Amino acid sequence: MSDVYVYRFTGWDGPTESDVRSRRATLETIKEIGAPIMESQIVVDDGELDADGFFRGNVANDSDPKEDLTNEINSLNLRAAARDSEALNLDEASAGARKYMLQLESRELRKQAQTLQRQQKQKRQSDIAAAESSDYSNLLDFAQLGASPTAG
């Protein structure tokens, strides 16, 4: 398994010519159907592509930042596992340097995934805290309205 770049793109989906921006695909696939959005580039494992070169992440929600982050974490873990698997099949004597580099890359990919998971967890917690704070603020406003001398 190897790393590949995938991109969102604008193009046409059959005779409807609908915008397919939310999907990602390799440049080779995109050149047949549209134009890549270069700033959307992400790296994924080639095992995450379908036979046509499209990223198999959650297509329906791929444009959702939360889903993007989840897809990126999954991809980092998949890429790390692929490197671990390859390193296990190498002989230390004949391919020691390659084995070491694969193990090093795997650790770095897992470290990146853990960092993103922490960020994702912190974001969820802050979203929950903000929602609870907003709910509490609304209750205070309601309580103050009932205590107001001009109220009802």
Image: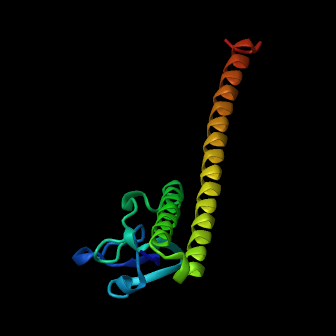
Is residue 30 shown left or right of residue 112? Answer: left
Q: Residue at x 28, y 75 (%)?
A: 51
Q: Quadrant where the N terminus lies?
A: bottom left
Q: Which residue is drawn at 70% across and 24% down?
A: 141
| Whole-percent x, y for residue 152 in the image | 67, 11
Q: Which residue lies furthest to the left in this view?
A: 15
Task: Tell me where residue 23 appears, x and y as whole percent.
Answer: 39, 69
What residue appears at the point 60 percent right and 52 percent down from the top-left corner?
A: 117
Quick check: can you spot residue 55?
A: no
* As drawn, 129 above or below 149: below
Name the foreground residue: 90 vs 152. Answer: 90
Position of residue 129 measured from the top left corner of the image (x, y, whole percent): 67, 35
Residue farthest to the front, as pictured: 93
Location of residue 89 by image quarter: bottom left
- Find residue 139 and report its image quarter: top right
The x, y position of residue 22, in whole percent, is: 42, 67
- In the displayed structure, 115 sits above or below 100; it is above
